[in-house]
Image (tube, rainbow, N blue to C red):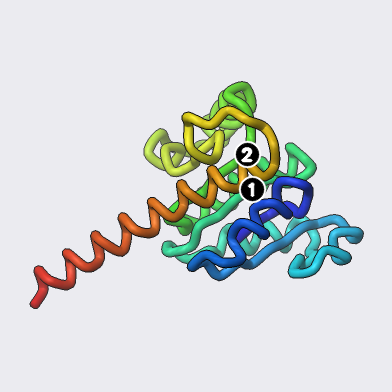
Amino acid sequence: LLFGAGHVGQAIARAFAPLPFKLFWYDSRPEAAQVPGVVVRAPAELAALAMGASREAYGLILTHDHALDYALASAGLAGGGFDYLGLIGSKTKRARFMHRLRDDGFSAVTLNRLTCPIGLPGLKSKAPEVIAVSVAADLLMRLEAAQASNDEGSLESV
């Protein structure tokens, strides 16, 4: 689930097009409906989607609004889904969000499920295309690791 259809969201959607991910792309702004593939929903509906995500889902939060980012991160963590939940932002944004989430009652174990900043740590560029490639590479590595783990588990049960 990709929340946000700005420059970075559009670059991520382009990067994911040939990859083995099924993209569900959302934004709350009416003008985002003009972007092919984006579904526009009210913020409360987006939070419900985040809260109801399956355990196998990957979530990326990169909206135009920090308050909406927080609502989506909080809902995603509260719902217990998402094998990966990523939030675009700086170390400062991460620190602010973690402090607020702790104040809202989230445990350290739950907070460890939130990845911020997103992408590979060695790439520092803020260019949307670089962020997109970095996120795609990170999620491909996670997907391959999960598939390898599942393959090992199925062999053990035979």
Mark 2 crowdedness (10 Å alpha carbons): few <14, some 14-19, many ≥20: some
Which residue is farthest bottom? 158
Q: Nearer the viewer, residue 24 or 68?
A: 24
State the residue position of label 2: 88
| Residue at disc 1, secondary structure | strand
Q: Write the residue at 74% across / 69% down.
A: 37
User: Marks 1 and 2: CB-CB under 8 Å?
Assistant: yes
Whole-Å distance between the Cαs marked 1 and 2? 6 Å
- What is the tally of numbered marks visible in this picture? 2
State the residue position of label 1: 61
Residue 129: image x %, image y %? 66, 45
The N terminus - image quarter: bottom right
Q: Amino acid at mark 2?
A: Ile
Residue 92: image x %, image y %? 62, 22
Q: Amino acid at mark 1?
A: Ile
Which residue is farthest right? 31
User: Left or right of 118: which side holds 141?
Assistant: left
Q: Nearer the viewer, residue 113 or 36?
A: 36
State which tag comes first along the sequence, 1 or 2: 1
